[in-house]
Image: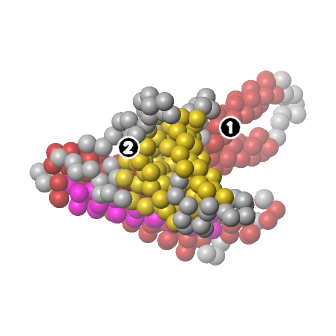
Amino acid sequence: MADAVTGIGGSSAAGATRADNDRQKLADDLDDFMTLLTTQLQHQDPLDPMDANEFTTQLVQFASVEQQIQQNANLEYLLNAQENSQLASVASYVGRMVEAETNQVQVYNGEAEFNYILHEDAVSTLINIVDDNGRTVFSAEGNIGQGKHGVIWDGTDLSGQRLPDGIYKLTVSALDADGAPVDVTTTAVGKVTGVSYAGTEPELMLTNQAIKLDKVISIQETAIELSEVDKIAAATLKAKASADDAKKSAEAAEDYATALQELVGENDISGLDDELKIATDMLEAANKASTAADEAYETAKNATSSYVAAEAAQTAAAESSKALVAATKGAQALARAKQLVAEANPDAA
């Protein structure tokens, strides 16, 4: 069975989100405001009391900011959901042999496989591999003809000693007849054992070697064959993740529709009703997709065949995507409605 996929959802789980920070700052500001207001009320002149309209307006502004922070939190969720969707798509690389452009070579189980590509004919080619200390552990002359050349290194150093498994630096240099450098591209071949999302974009893990997706040149082997039980378990896990995401999208769509309903109730502006209808329709679509995704998860959980479980997982993923699209359209409708309100009340901005 392939190693576990690592780093799923890492970007969304690392630290507090911007909405969390904004929500905390709002709470602190509101506490300060209420303390100041209470102090002013205690010391006001009974013959000349404070104007209630001013602090009432400020309280309304706090409520408006709080609503905006919640909507920002929903948008952050949608962005994280899209990132996780991208990660799920690259998880299919796990268990496959890939070739990727890199200047590193990995010794695994005492052996390393790599290629180098000469972009034109050369008169000399030198292959060097060094360890973390900069010590040359392998050196050999290479082919000089233009094209791709493969090398399988047995993981022994220049004295014949076997080296420990790990990452080593690879350099291939070539010269033409005039002594000028020839362009060389080096690639590594290895089995994908996991996917990491620790950085800003997914990376394939070839045991301990991280490879960016845009460096992958080819997939050389089909995925490792799992047992029937493992296939069902994997499909069920995917279906549950999709069902959970669909539910969150439906909740976000409901927040957008509710906020838009409040705008319509507070403003008599042309076009708001149209945006409310869109948000309401999107809420209905998101709820429908969420229900379908949950049903697909139940089907996968109770499946006795990996084929049925896989089909259910695909259905759950498709319904989750529908829910996400619906929630996104609901957010867009709310944003357009707010723009209409702002344009109709320029002095309130």
Which residue is painted at 38% across and 43% down in the image?
A: 193
| Camera sees residue 334 | no
The residue at which mark 1 appears reads as: 26
Q: Are marks 2 and 1 in contact (CB under 8 Å)?
A: no
Residue 127 image point, x, y percent: 56, 48
Magenta span contains residue 326: yes
Of the pair 93 and 134, the residue shown nearer to us: 134
Please name the amino acid that badge 2 sits on: Thr
Looking at this rendering, what residue extends furthest in the left direction? 304
Of the pair 171 and 64, the residue shown nearer to us: 171
Residue 206 image point, x, y percent: 43, 44
Task: Decide if residue 24 is on the left or right side of residue 97.
Answer: right
Task: Decide if residue 60 is on the left or right side of residue 185.
Answer: right
Which residue is painted at 47% across and 59% down in the image?
A: 149
Tell me which segment is drawn in magenta. 309-336
Q: Residues within 10 Å of mark 2 (few under 14, many from 20)?
A: many
The residue at which mark 2 appears reads as: 193
Please name the amino acid that badge 1 sits on: Leu
Q: Secondary structure at mark 2?
A: loop
Residue 52 image point, x, y percent: 77, 41
The relative height of residue 212 versus residue 333 in the rendered view (above or below) is above
Q: Residues within 10 Å of mark 1 (few under 14, many from 20)?
A: some
Among numbered discs 2 and 1, the one appearing first in the sequence: 1
The relative height of residue 288 versus residue 301 in the rendered view (above or below) is below
Residue 16 image point, x, y percent: 59, 36
Mark 2, mark 1: which one is toward the viewer?
2
